[in-house]
Amino acid sequence: MTTPAPTAPDGRRADAKQVLWSLAPSVYAPTLLEFAGLAALMPVIPLMALDLGFAAWQAAAITTIFGLTSFLGPIPAGRFISRVGARLALVSTGVLLVVSNLAAYVLLAPALHGAPGLGHQVTFIVLLLVMAVSIQVWQLGRQAYLGTALPAAMRARGMTLFGGVIRLGEVIGPLLGALVMALGSEAGVFLLFAVTAAAGTVMIAVFLPPGETQRAPGQGSGPRSRRSPARVRLDRAVLGRMVRVGLGIAPVMMARVNRPVIVPLLGSSLGVDSVWISVVFGVSAALEILLVIPAGTLMDRFGRVAVAVPCALTMGAGFTLLAILGTALDGRGETLALIALLVPCLLIGVGNGLGSGIVMTLGIDVSPVYGRTGYLAWWNTMLGAGRLAAPLLVTGIVLVAPIVVASAATGGLCLVGGAWLARTLPRVTPSGGTRSP
């Protein structure tokens, strides 16, 4: 069921604002709350693992739980959402998020300051897995719902705003987490996540109308449903289109995953203080948020190519420049080392800001209206493979070469991806100029 777009006597601009405002309490505000809580928790997970008695390599491996679920989770999550509906799926997994975080606080807080045992370690892993699976349902459910609720002429603006809200949560979350830990302990972030997840779940339960429930005659909920010959041909065409587009956008996803690994490691090798590395990330994040609305407007007016290609090429240029300056200015002093880090990161931030929401927008573009949740699950699974492969690429390179080589490799992949998108996207996505009253 689709929520009708409100009308306004002021014309198209007023209509767009009203549609986005109408989605604020059901989608955008809960997303901000969820990602603020998640972003507060993520940096603390390795530290908690060490306090619970895990070795350093085991603590690092535990963080891959979220990457694994982003690869393995979308298809089961899509079936669950299609079976019970978006609202029930989101509310039930929201409750699960709240309960798992409260359980983590109650069961693990004493162990973090006492004598942890094997039971605490197993509990930690199980609860993180529950959280990761719940988050997959939340992300896919809201993406599918937005694909139905947003008019086609303003889809990019709505999805870009969705991506921008996620980025804002990722900025606010660590600050809130630091405050909670300063006032209490590391385990306090579980309480913070429980509170933000509870608030988001209540908003979804109150404001979210029934989600995607439309099915074409004889169709099921996605690519794995019982299929007629016509449906088989449709599935092959859709999945082929997804692969073609995914090959170009996957390097952007890999660059996003690699940035928080490459930049700190390269900054450390250049002798940049950790405080300044954090400042570089903060400035870059602020620049990204400023580009959220312009990026969506560009996509709706001029097509996906107008944003996806510059996003990939700019990020590729940024990572390549990071490798070049990191090599050329190594050992030249702290000021030049900071410049070698800051300038490329600003360029990467511009590219990433332009690409706010581009992956989710493209997923909806290449998915049919009927059974969209199932198709989006396939799209998210393909990109989840890129998220999972990205840190493995960096790890493999760093084992045999300096970190600047990993930066250059990431940049090269983005440049190739941008060239591929320039050729592929005009054939499979809206060309722009589709805005209508």
Image (cartoon, helix red, strand yellow):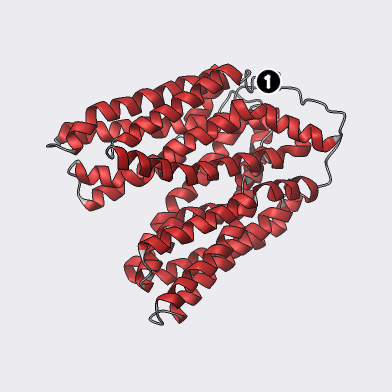
Q: How crowded is mark 1: few (under 14 residues within 10 Å), some or many (20 or more)?
A: some
Q: Can residue 37 be seen in this view?
A: yes
| Residue 152 appears left or right of 42 | right
Image location (x, y in percent) of residue 313: 63, 63
Is 408 or 33 nearer to us in this picture? 33
Among all residues in the image, which is located at the extreme front?
A: 183
Q: Is residue 222 visible?
A: no
Image location (x, y in percent) of residue 116: 15, 36
For disc 1, the marked residue is 214
Give the amino acid at mark 1: Gln
Q: Where, quadrant-wise, is the N terminus in this rendering?
A: top right
Q: Where, quadrant-wise, is the C terminus in this rendering?
A: top right
Is 131 or 228 nearer to us in this picture? 131
| Residue 23 appears left or right of 399 | right
Q: Is residue 396 above or below residue 115?
A: below
Q: Which residue is drawn at 58% across and 62% down?
A: 315
Q: Residue at x 66, y 28 (%)?
A: 23
| Residue 430 appears left or right of 374 | right
Image location (x, y in percent) of residue 258: 45, 57
Q: In which quarter of the image is residue 180?
A: top left
